[in-house]
Image (cartoon, rainbow, N blue to C red):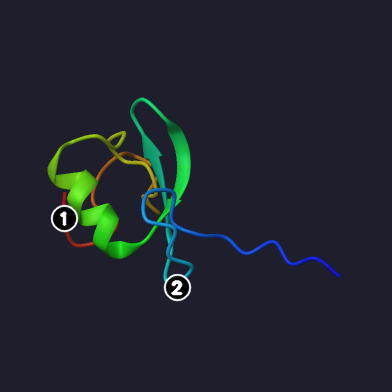
Amino acid sequence: MSTNKTSCHFCGSSESALLWAEHKELGGMWVCPDCWRKVFVKNLFVTGSGSSKGDGGCSCGSCG
């Protein structure tokens, strides 16, 4: 029996709170919160990827 455990694309962490993100150069990937913050600061994610609104804006429901 094989298990296919998803892990962070950058650090390999397999914690349960992985986030899906679209990297500008590498495409879609699973990323842990720590690596997500680091890559987000460098502006390397596609704007609006992972947003539940679908319009590229903030997904909190209070903005815009």
CA–CA distance in space, label 2 to label 1: 30 Å
As drawn, is 27 to the left or to the right of 64?
A: right
Residue at x 14%, y 38% (from the top left corner): 42
Residue 35 showing in the rendered view: yes
* Front in this rendered view, residue 9 or 64: 9
Residue at x 25%, y 44% (from the top left corner): 57
The amino acid beneath tag 1 is: Cys
As drawn, is 31 to the left or to the right of 4?
A: left
Residue at x 36%, y 35% (from the top left corner): 23
- Residue 34 horizontal/vertical position (percent): 25, 62
Q: Is residue 26 above or below residue 54?
A: above
**SS assignment at label 2:** loop
**SS assignment at label 1:** loop
- Residue 20 horizontal/vertical position (percent): 44, 52
Q: Which residue bears the numbered disc 1? A: 63
Q: Earlier in the sequence, mark 2 or mark 1?
A: 2
The amino acid beneath tag 2 is: Glu
Q: Which residue bears the numbered disc 2? A: 15
